[in-house]
Image (cartoon, rainbow, N blue to C red):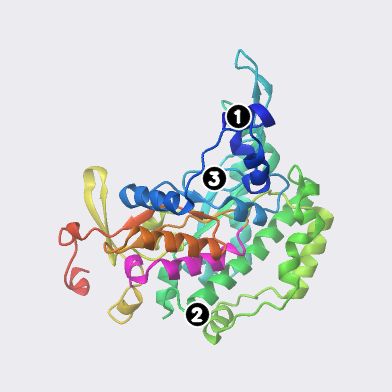
């Protein structure tokens, strides 16, 4: 990496390796060591098997999907924040020569069940986007000038979601089923239209766009092309009925055409709009399942400070729908990846995706899931979790209905 920075004038982390790979390999001035790709991948899985990390960012996938000018070279710890940043330059006294743009995580998540039950779906999304934008506007992290500058220029937010599994089970839909995937696709599809429309209205009201809008795929209209190439409608009758029952209009092609025209004319206020975090703690106080992944147990147990153990039954769980509450280890990685892939199509940043495996899993199983995720267009992978049968019997066991 030092050779690359010395010879090419930028840190190795700022180099697009896929674009420069052949050039770097051919450059005799760059010291290199040839390794077996399969061995490397297996070693990665072995480490994840033991510790759950490192996390993975599929850099090329991330940048192909990025609608903003510039290159994304990192995520945050939870792997859902994917934004363009620029480095600062410091002199020998560590004073700023140029202040770059770094990232402020202005995050908040909607409860999918409450959002679908809202008397005005669009107004709910608008309120969330405006609220998170207010957080961005009121955040002044002057102690880190690059974060202050980046936040002021981008107005970036991360609108997330939680309670997908809970909502699906309430409505009699199995996680990862055809209906489950169909709902996930059209829920995020509809959220995206309303989030963009709100950001456009804010840009028009304030006469202010995010810095760099003119160089983005929003300004050129290219971003909207997938939504204009076909008529988007749910494949399953069940999902059509859910949206109809909630009085939610699924945006049609004419609505996307009008939004495209308005965005190209007025711009949008927020550089980034959506990111799906793990919601590991806030989901409990929302009586919601975490993020958009399945439950890890029908009754989850957390240790809360001096309170001790607190028991959280899965939301909406009854004797009648118990079969729909398979946990993440039973569901397996493929259905989780399929679900996240449906949402990923519409989310401009990332989604925090944890993979769950039974204790019989091998490093090969982990590698197969990682390759499958890459093929499905997943941007990042968070933790690898393995069920530990050695701990079975130490928590809830037997009749879950009785435990409730």
* Direction from residue 112 to residue 10 in the image, left or right: right
**Residue 154 point in image, percent of width and height:** 68, 43
Q: Which residue is mark 1?
A: 3
Distance (Cα) linking label 2 and label 1: 52 Å
* Direction from residue 401 to residue 68 in the image, left or right: right
Mark closer to the observer (2, 1):
1
Q: Residue at x 37, y 68 (%)?
A: 332
Q: Residue at x 71, y 68 (%)?
A: 226
**Residue 4 point in image, percent of width and height:** 62, 32
Q: Residue at x 63, y 56 (%)?
A: 348
- The residue range painted magenta reads 326-347
Whether the magenta-drawn stretch holds residue 173 is answered as no
Residue 179 is tagged as 2
Q: Give the class, few, some or many, for how many residues have Cα within 10 Å of label 3's Cα (few <14, many ≥20).
A: many
Q: Quadrant of residue 294?
A: bottom left
Q: Which residue is mark 3?
A: 75
**Mark 2 or mark 3: which comes first in sequence?**
3
């Amino acid at each position: 990496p030092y050779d690359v920075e010395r010879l090419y004038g930028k840190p190795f982390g700022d180099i697009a390796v896929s674009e420069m790979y052949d050039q770097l390999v051919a450059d005799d001035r760059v010291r290199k060591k040839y390794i077996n790709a399969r061995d490397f991948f297996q070693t990665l899985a072995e480490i994840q098997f033991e510790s759950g990390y490192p996390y993975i960012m599929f850099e090329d996938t991330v940048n192909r999907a990025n609608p903003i000018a510039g290159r994304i070279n990192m995520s945050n710890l939870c792997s859902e924040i994917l934004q363009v940043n620029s480095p600062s330059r410091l002199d020998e006294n560590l004073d700023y020569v140029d202040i770059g743009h770094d990232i402020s995580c202005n995050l908040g998540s909607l409860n999918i069940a409450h959002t679908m039950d809202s008397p005005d779906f669009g107004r709910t999304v608008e309120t969330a986007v405006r609220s998170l934008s207010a957080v961005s506007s009121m955040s002044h992290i002057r102690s880190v000038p690059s974060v202050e500058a980046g936040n002021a220029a981008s107005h970036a937010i991360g609108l997330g979601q939680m309670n997908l599994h809970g909502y699906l089970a309430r409505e009699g839909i199995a996680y990862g089923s055809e209906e489950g995937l169909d709902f996930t696709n059209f829920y995020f599809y509809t959220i995206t239209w309303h989030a963009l429309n709100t950001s456009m209205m804010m840009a028009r009201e304030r006469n202010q766009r995010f810095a760099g809008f003119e160089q983005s795929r929003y300004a050129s209209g290219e971003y909207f092309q997938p939504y204009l190439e076909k008529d988007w409608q749910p494949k399953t009758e069940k999902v059509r009925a859910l949206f109809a029952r909630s009085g939610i209009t699924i945006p049609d092609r004419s609505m996307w055409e009008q939004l495209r025209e308005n965005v190209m004319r007025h711009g949008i206020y927020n550089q980034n709009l959506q990111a799906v975090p793990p919601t590991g703690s806030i989901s409990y106080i929302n009586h919601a399942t975490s993020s958009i992944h399945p439950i890890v147990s029908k009754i989850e147990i957390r240790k809360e400070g001096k309170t001790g153990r607190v028991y959280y039954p899965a939301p909406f769980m009854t004797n009648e729908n118990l079969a729909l509450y398979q946990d993440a280890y039973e569901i397996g990685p493929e259905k989780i990846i399929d679900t996240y892939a449906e949402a990923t199509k519409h989310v401009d940043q990332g989604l925090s995706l944890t993979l769950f495996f039974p204790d019989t899993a091998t490093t090969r199983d982990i590698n197969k899931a990682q390759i499958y995720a890459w093929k499905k267009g997943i941007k990042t992978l968070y933790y690898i979790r393995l069920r530990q049968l050695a701990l079975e019997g130490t928590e809830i066991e037997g009749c879950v209905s009785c435990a409730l």
